[in-house]
């Protein structure tokens, strides 16, 4: 990119990639179902609700506007759809009752009864967290698995999309009790970038899908609660809720006032009866602007100051056959870019999210060749090709793009069509 300065941004918990297993989805005819997940009574959109096919590993999540797209193999059309959202009553719907488009699914808020919460309630929040972490080898997947996942990363300047990259990846998941790292393979990817909105600075996210994969706390507890660091937090009981009829305790945590290094604060959603972490939502303490900048910015021009103003994470787990596994995660980073000598600064936000849409046990034990693995230093925007036709993803489940992203995609597609009509080529 001529005459442009590149700022490299990488989440600080990326690490070495382990061996993985090759996997490719078997092609099969499918049917698409589109709709919205809404709160009963208020019709408020429910973002990141889980939409899955009962008795299978096929699933997706709703986008920030509550919209979902679910692709179901024809062989599963007699199945039921399960829609669930933290704090709401789950709903099971026969697929045959859904339309291909414009489905509106309402979920009812789950009411917690105080008398029920007080029965056999644990007394020590920190002890409960330690017990959950110690049982991860029992409660989460014990077998190596191969997961298909959809990944999206966006970069915005203020509220305008300037870069969008999407990919389908294969995750080669090691058992939760194992110290072996997960590996990934890029299967399909596309991108759109409008550098005209970036002024003289271009941002790129280093690490790509690994930034979301390592938010899997139960597989990588060392990235948030490193050995001995639990002692550096204060844990307190917050409130309770329900998910799939299971009572969930919400435990708030924050670093002790005596700890100077930037750690985390947030909430852990724990199934108390089974000692299972079902979700976690947390942020990085970034009160020290200079230290936070060193954690995230890999490369920048000398006359530019760059620092994060928000760094937040979320991870959700799903259950099948009594075992839990990583289902969805997202990372949001907001940065200020300040040119020395200029009156105004720029604000950029970078969002990365990944959802597991299918998985199976790895019984073959095959390994992936080094050249086929995604490297921890990958910059997806450099690897992906331009936006393609609407059927680019085929049968793969994706997260429906929000309206602003859809608008950006349509703009790119219109430009490509005009270029083709005029007999000229357009850069992807």
Image: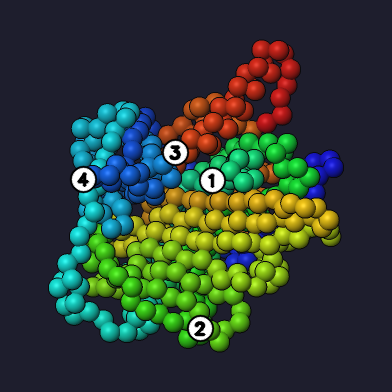
Q: Earlier in the sequence, mark 4 or mark 1?
A: 4
Q: Going by the picture, which residue comes out furthest to the left? A: 115
Indicate which disc residue 400 carries: 3
**Residue 176 visible in this rendered orientation of the protein:** no
Q: Going by the picture, which residue comes out furthest to the front? A: 343
Q: Residues within 10 Å of mark 2 (few under 14, many from 20)?
A: few
C-alpha separation, residue under disc 4 versus residue under disc 1: 28 Å
* 157 sits left or right of 54 in the view: right
C-alpha separation, residue under disc 4 versus residue under disc 2: 43 Å
Please name the residue that numbered disc 2 is placed on: 256
Q: Residue at x 69, y 66 (%)?
A: 293
Q: Earlier in the sequence, mark 1 or mark 3?
A: 1
Which quadrant does the N terminus fall into?
top right
Q: Residue at x 60, y 27 (%)?
A: 411
Q: Residue at x 56, y 71 (%)?
A: 285
Q: Residues within 10 Å of mark 3 (few under 14, many from 20)?
A: many
């Amino acid at each position: 990119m001529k005459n442009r300065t590149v700022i490299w941004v990488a989440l600080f918990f990326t690490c070495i990639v382990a061996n993985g297993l090759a996997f490719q989805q078997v092609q099969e005819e499918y049917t698409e179902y589109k709709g919205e997940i809404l709160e009963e009574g208020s019709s408020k959109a429910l973002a990141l609700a889980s939409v899955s096919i009962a008795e299978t590993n096929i699933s997706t999540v709703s986008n920030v506007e509550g919209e979902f797209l679910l692709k179901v193999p024809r062989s599963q059309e007699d199945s039921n759809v399960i829609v669930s959202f933290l704090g709401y009553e789950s709903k099971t719907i026969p697929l045959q009752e859904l339309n291909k488009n414009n489905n509106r699914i309402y979920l009812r808020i789950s009411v917690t009864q105080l008398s029920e919460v007080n029965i056999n309630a644990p007394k020590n929040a920190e002890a409960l967290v330690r017990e959950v972490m110690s049982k991860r080898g029992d409660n989460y997947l014990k077998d190596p698995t191969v997961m298909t996942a959809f990944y999206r990363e966006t970069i915005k300047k203020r509220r305008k999309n300037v870069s969008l990259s999407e990919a389908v990846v294969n995750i080669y998941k090691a058992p939760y009790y194992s110290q072996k790292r997960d590996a990934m393979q890029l299967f399909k990817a596309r991108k759109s970038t409008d550098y005209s909105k970036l002024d003289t600075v271009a941002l790129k996210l280093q690490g790509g899908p690994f930034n979301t994969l390592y938010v899997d706390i139960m597989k990588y507890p060392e990235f948030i609660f490193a050995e001995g660091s639990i002692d550096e937090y204060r844990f307190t009981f917050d409130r309770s809720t329900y998910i799939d009829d299971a009572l969930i305790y919400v435990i708030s945590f924050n670093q002790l006032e005596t700890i100077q290094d930037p750690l985390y604060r947030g909430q852990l959603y724990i199934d108390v009866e089974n000692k299972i972490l079902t979700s976690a939502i947390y942020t990085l303490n970034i009160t020290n602007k200079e230290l936070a900048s060193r954690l995230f910015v890999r490369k920048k021009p000398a006359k530019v100051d760059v620092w994060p103003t928000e760094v937040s994470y979320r991870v959700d787990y799903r259950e099948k056959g009594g075992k839990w596994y990583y289902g969805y995660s997202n990372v949001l980073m907001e940065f200020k870019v300040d040119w020395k000598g200029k009156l105004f600064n720029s604000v950029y936000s970078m969002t990365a999210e990944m959802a597991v849409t299918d998985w199976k046990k790895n019984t073959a034990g095959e390994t992936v060749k080094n050249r086929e693995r995604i490297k921890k230093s990958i910059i997806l925007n450099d690897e992906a090709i331009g936006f393609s036709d609407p059927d680019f993803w085929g049968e793969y489940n994706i997260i429906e793009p929000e309206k602003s992203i859809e608008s950006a995609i349509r703009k790119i597609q219109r430009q490509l069509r005009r270029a083709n009509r005029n007999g000229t080529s357009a850069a992807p």
